[in-house]
Image: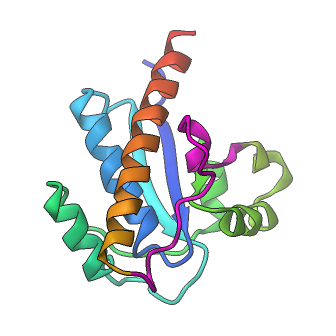
Amino acid sequence: MTAPVRVLMVCLGNICRSPTAHIVFARRVAEAGLQDQVLVDSAGTGDWHIGHPPDARSCAAAAARGYDMSALRARQVQARDFHEFDLVLAMDENNLRDLQRLAPPQHRHKLRLFMDFADMDERSVPDPYYGEAEDFQRVLDLVETAADALLRHLRQRQQE
């Protein structure tokens, strides 16, 4: 059996976008019966929210679609993450730049934008933190689309 593919979702504080991507993608992986082959985690580039649960508005938006984020806790990206994860997926260009700065050169090939997997014009998942309820719904829309596309990508990669 091959080693599982390890995917890390990353945003700024790890309380809105990356935990949403984490829980949505983990659900897609479980529904596909691939939880032994694909492992998912999330982290933030910043340290403001370490140990905190996801933002209540993110949790409410996720819960309305049947996702439970209550077990997640924010953490900051660590140096070991670049070694341990096969894909480190940033929610936006700013976090991608921060990751490129932090990653050892031999691991920079693992860094991508999460939305790169979706066939959409959007390149980033916008930060809803200072927004309204509909902004959290938009994050879920984008994340669900990108999660489906990422799962297709990983399945195709497995078959090669």
Nearer the observer, 5 or 155: 155
Q: Residue at x 54, y 68 (%)?
A: 11
How is the model colour-coded?
Answer: rainbow
Q: Is residue 87 magenta?
A: no
Q: Which residues are magenta?
A: 110-131
Q: Residue furthest top?
A: 160
User: Residue 94's image quarter?
Assistant: bottom right
In the rendered image, which quarter contains the N terminus? top left
Q: Residue at x 39, y 71 (%)?
A: 135
In this rendering, position of residue 133 left or right of residue 111:
left
- Residue 156 lies, in percent from the top left, at 51, 17
Q: Main secondary structure of the magenta part?
A: loop
Nearer the observer, 52 or 129: 129
- Residue 58 lies, in percent from the top left, at 30, 72
User: Residue 138's image quarter?
Assistant: bottom left
Q: Residue at x 36, y 52 (%)?
A: 141
Q: Residue at x 24, y 67 (%)?
A: 61
- The answer to whether residue 87 of the structure is visible from this angle is no
- Residue 140 lies, in percent from the top left, at 35, 57
